[in-house]
C-alpha cells in the first residue's frame, strides 16, 4: 500500500510539471491584460495534436514536433490577442465570452481535422520505463518534467531580469504607472500572449507524450489551470509549481485509491477546500474577492 | 394601448398560428420545440448576466440537475410530471446553493469556477448509478401527461408547454427588472462598491439572481427530459446546453428580454437547417465564429447593430 501511495505521489509530481506550464500561461496573460483566456487549454491541445500528426504522419519522435508546435501555437495565441484587443467596452465580461467562443472554434477545428477519437503516443522510446529505486515512470514523464523545470527557471529569469519580462510585471501591477515609465502596454500584452503560447506548445507535446488526448480535453485543461492558479494565488512561479504538483498528486492519489472516473473531482475538492479555508490561495495574493 | 395590441397579436400568433401552420409537420415542430428549450436556457443565462453581472459557463449543470431530479422523482416516486418539473427547478436551486461560496470570487474567477462545477455534476450523474442509471442513462422517462382530454405528449402539446414556461419566465424576469431589486442590480452594474456603500447587500442580491436563474434553467431541463423521454449524463450535462444559449443570448442582445428568445429560435434553426447539413460534425464551429464576431462588432446584440446603422442614416455625424 505504501508503495502504491509513494508511486502515486511520484506520478503526481511528474504530472505537475506540465500542469504548471499551462497554469503559468493562463496567469501571465491574466496578469498583463486582466483577461482570462478560456481558449488556453485548447491552445495546449492544438500543440498536442501537432505532436500526434508529426508522429503518425512522419513517423518521427513527438519531440521533433516542438518547433512546429511553437510556431503554430504562438501564432494562434497572437491571433487570440488581436481579437481580444478589439473589444471596446465591458472588457471583463466580453473577453470571457469571446475567448470561450475561440475555444469552441478551436475544439471544432481539432474535431474536423483529427476526428473525435482519443489519441496517445505509439513511440516506444517515449514509453520506455524509467526506474528510480521503487518508483516507476515512463521516460517521457521524467524528460518533460525536467523540461518544464528548465522552462520555469527560464521564465523566472525572464520576468525578473530581462527588460520585457519586467515590463510585463510592471503592466501587471500598475498599468498607468507603467505607461508613464515609457512601457507600451499593448506591446507588452502581445509579448505575454507569445510567452503563454510558448509554454502551451511545450505542455501540449508533453501531454501527448505520456497521456491520452481527445478534442474535448481542452476545456478540462483550462479548468485545471484555473484550479492551480486559485491554489497558488497569482504572482509567484514557485507557488504555481507547488499548486500544480498538489493537483497532480491529488489526482494520482484519487486514481490509485478510488477510481479514475473520480479524477476530476479530486481537483475540485481541493479547489473548494482552499476557497473555504484560504480564499487568497496558499501563497497569498489579493484582489480576488468580490 | 398600442403596445398591448402588439403583445396580444404576438401571443395569438405564437399560440395559435404556429401550431396551425406547422403542427402537422413533426420535423419542423420538433425543431421549434428544441429552439424554445434553448430560448429558455438563454433567457435564464441572460438574466444572470444582465441583472447579476455574472457570466456563467455552467448552466449545463442546472439543466442536467433539473432534468435528473424531475425524471427520478416522477419515475421512482410517481410524482405527477408537472409537479416534478417544478421540483426539478427546485433541484437546480439546491445545486446552485452549493455554488454560493464561489460568489466570493470576482468576475473572471466566478466564470471559471462555475465552468468547473458543471464538470462535477456530470461526473456525479455518471457515477451515482443507483439513482441515475449511470452512463447507460434513464429510458422511459414519463411523458408529459394528458390533461382535460388534451394530450401534451404530442409535439404540439410540448410546444404549448415550453412556450408557456418561457413566457412565464420572461414575465418574471420583467417583474424583477422593474422591482426595487432590479434598480439595485442596475446600480450594481454601474458600480458595485458605491451600491454597497448605500446599504445594498450585493452578494445576497447576486446570490438571489443565481437562484432564480438556476430555477428557470432547471425547469427547462426537466421539461426537455419528459419531452424526449430519455436521459443520459453526457446528453443532460452536454456543453451544448451552454454554448448555443450563450450564442443565442449574445446574438439577440443579452440585455433585453426578448433578445435571447428570438436569438435562440433564429440561431438554432439556422444551425440545424443549414449548417448541420453542410458539415455534419463540427458545425458548432459556426457558432463559435458567430460568437466571436458578435462580441467584436456588436456586443449588445444584432438589434443594436441594426439600430446603429439606421441612426447613422438619419442623423448626420
Image (cartoon, coloured by chain):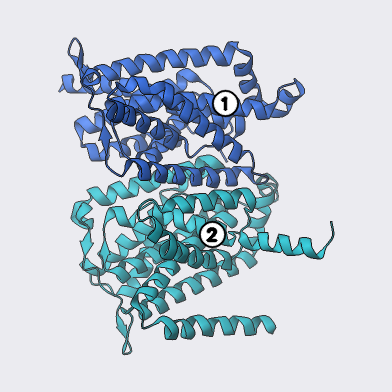
Judging from the image, what is the letter of the chain drawn in cyan?
B
Spot occupied by residue A48 in the image (x, y as percentages of width and height): 36, 30
Residue projecting furthest to the front: A58
Residue A192 image label: 1
In the visual, does B263 lie left or right of A253? right
Disc on res. A148: none
Element type where label 1 sits in the image: helix
Residue A288 locus on image (x, y percent)? 55, 35
Residues tagged 2 and 1 counted as in contact (Cβ below 8 A): no
Residue B156, given in percent of the width and then of the height, sits at: 37, 80
Q: Residue at x 61, y 60 (%)?
A: B302
Q: CA distance from mark 2 to mark 1?
A: 31 Å
Would you place residue B210 above or below residue A61 in this image?
below
Task: Tell me the quarter of the picture where residue B254 sits.
Answer: bottom right
Q: What's the mark number on residue B249?
A: 2
* Visual hue assigned to chain A: blue
Left or right? Give the position of B285 relative to A140: right
Amino acid at each position: 500500500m505504501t508503495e502504491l501511495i509513494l508511486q502515486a505521489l511520484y506520478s503526481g509530481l511528474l504530472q505537475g510539471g506540465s500542469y504548471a506550464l499551462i497554469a503559468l500561461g493562463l496567469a501571465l496573460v491574466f496578469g498583463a491584460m486582466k483577461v482570462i483566456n478560456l481558449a488556453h487549454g485548447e491552445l495546449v491541445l492544438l500543440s498536442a495534436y501537432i505532436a500526434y500528426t508529426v508522429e503518425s504522419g512522419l513517423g518521427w519522435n513527438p519531440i521533433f514536433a516542438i518547433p512546429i508546435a511553437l510556431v503554430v501555437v504562438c501564432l494562434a495565441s497572437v491571433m487570440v490577442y488581436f481579437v481580444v484587443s478589439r473589444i471596446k467596452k465591458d472588457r471583463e465580461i466580453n473577453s470571457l465570452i469571446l475567448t470561450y467562443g475561440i475555444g469552441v472554434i478551436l475544439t471544432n477545428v481539432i474535431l474536423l481535422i483529427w476526428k473525435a477519437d482519443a489519441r496517445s503516443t505509439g513511440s516506444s522510446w517515449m514509453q520506455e520505463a524509467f526506474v528510480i529505486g521503487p518508483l516507476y515512470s515512463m521516460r517521457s514523464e521524467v524528460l518533460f518534467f525536467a523540461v518544464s523545470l528548465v522552462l520555469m527557471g527560464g521564465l523566472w529569469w525572464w520576468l525578473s531580469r530581462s527588460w520585457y519580462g519586467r515590463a510585463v510585471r510592471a503592466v501587471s501591477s500598475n498599468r498607468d504607472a507603467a505607461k508613464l515609465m515609457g512601457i507600451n502596454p499593448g506591446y507588452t500584452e502581445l509579448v505575454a500572449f507569445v510567452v503563454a503560447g510558448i509554454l502551451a506548445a511545450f505542455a501540449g507535446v508533453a501531454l501527448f507524450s505520456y497521456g491520452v488526448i481527445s478534442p474535448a480535453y481542452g476545456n478540462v485543461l483550462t479548468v485545471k489551470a484555473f484550479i492551480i492558479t486559485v491554489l497558488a494565488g497569482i504572482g509567484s512561479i514557485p507557488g504555481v509549481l507547488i499548486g500544480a504538483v498538489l493537483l497532480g498528486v491529488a489526482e494520482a492519489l484519487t486514481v490509485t485509491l478510488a477510481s479514475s472516473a473520480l479524477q476530476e473531482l479530486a481537483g475540485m475538492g481541493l479547489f473548494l477546500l482552499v476557497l473555504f479555508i484560504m480564499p487568497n490561495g496558499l501563497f497569498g495574493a489579493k484582489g480576488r474577492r468580490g | 394601448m398600442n403596445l398591448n395590441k402588439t403583445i396580444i397579436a404576438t401571443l395569438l400568433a405564437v399560440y395559435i398560428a404556429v401550431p396551425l401552420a406547422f403542427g402537422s409537420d413533426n420535423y419542423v415542430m420538433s425543431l421549434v420545440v428544441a429552439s424554445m428549450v434553448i430560448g429558455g436556457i438563454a433567457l435564464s443565462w441572460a438574466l444572470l448576466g444582465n441583472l447579476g453581472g455574472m457570466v456563467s459557463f455552467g448552466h449545463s449543470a442546472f439543466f442536467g440537475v433539473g432534468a435528473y431530479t424531475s425524471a427520478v422523482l416522477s419515475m421512482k416516486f410517481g410524482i405527477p410530471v408537472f409537479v416534478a418539473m417544478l421540483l426539478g427547478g427546485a433541484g437546480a436551486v439546491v445545486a446552485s446553493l452549493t455554488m454560493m461560496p464561489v460568489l466570493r470570487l470576482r468576475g473572471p474567477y466566478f466564470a471559471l469556477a462555475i465552468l468547473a462545477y458543471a464538470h462535477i455534476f456530470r461526473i456525479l450523474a455518471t457515477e451515482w448509478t443507483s439513482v441515475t442509471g449511470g452512463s447507460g442513462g434513464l429510458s422511459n422517462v414519463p411523458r408529459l401527461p394528458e390533461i382535460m382530454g388534451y394530450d401534451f405528449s404530442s409535439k404540439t402539446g410540448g410546444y404549448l408547454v415550453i412556450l408557456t414556461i418561457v413566457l412565464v419566465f420572461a414575465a418574471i424576469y420583467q417583474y424583477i427588472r422593474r422591482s426595487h431589486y432590479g434598480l439595485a442590480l442596475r446600480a450594481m452594474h454601474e458600480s458595485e462598491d458605491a451600491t454597497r456603500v448605500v446599504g445594498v447587500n450585493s452578494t445576497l442580491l447576486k446570490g438571489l439572481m443565481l437562484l432564480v436563474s438556476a430555477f428557470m434553467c432547471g425547469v427547462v431541463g426537466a421539461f426537455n427530459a419528459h419531452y424526449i423521454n430519455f436521459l443520459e449524463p453526457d446528453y443532460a450535462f452536454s456543453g451544448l446546453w451552454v454554448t448555443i444559449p450563450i450564442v443565442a443570448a449574445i446574438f439577440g442582445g443579452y440585455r433585453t428580454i426578448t433578445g435571447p428568445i428570438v436569438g435562440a429560435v433564429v440561431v438554432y434553426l439556422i444551425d440545424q437547417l443549414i449548417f448541420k447539413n453542410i458539415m455534419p460534425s463540427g458545425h458548432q464551429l459556426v457558432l463559435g465564429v458567430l460568437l466571436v464576431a458578435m462580441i467584436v462588432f456588436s456586443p449588445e446584440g444584432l438589434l443594436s447593430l441594426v439600430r446603429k446603422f439606421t441612426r447613422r442614416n438619419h442623423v448626420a455625424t
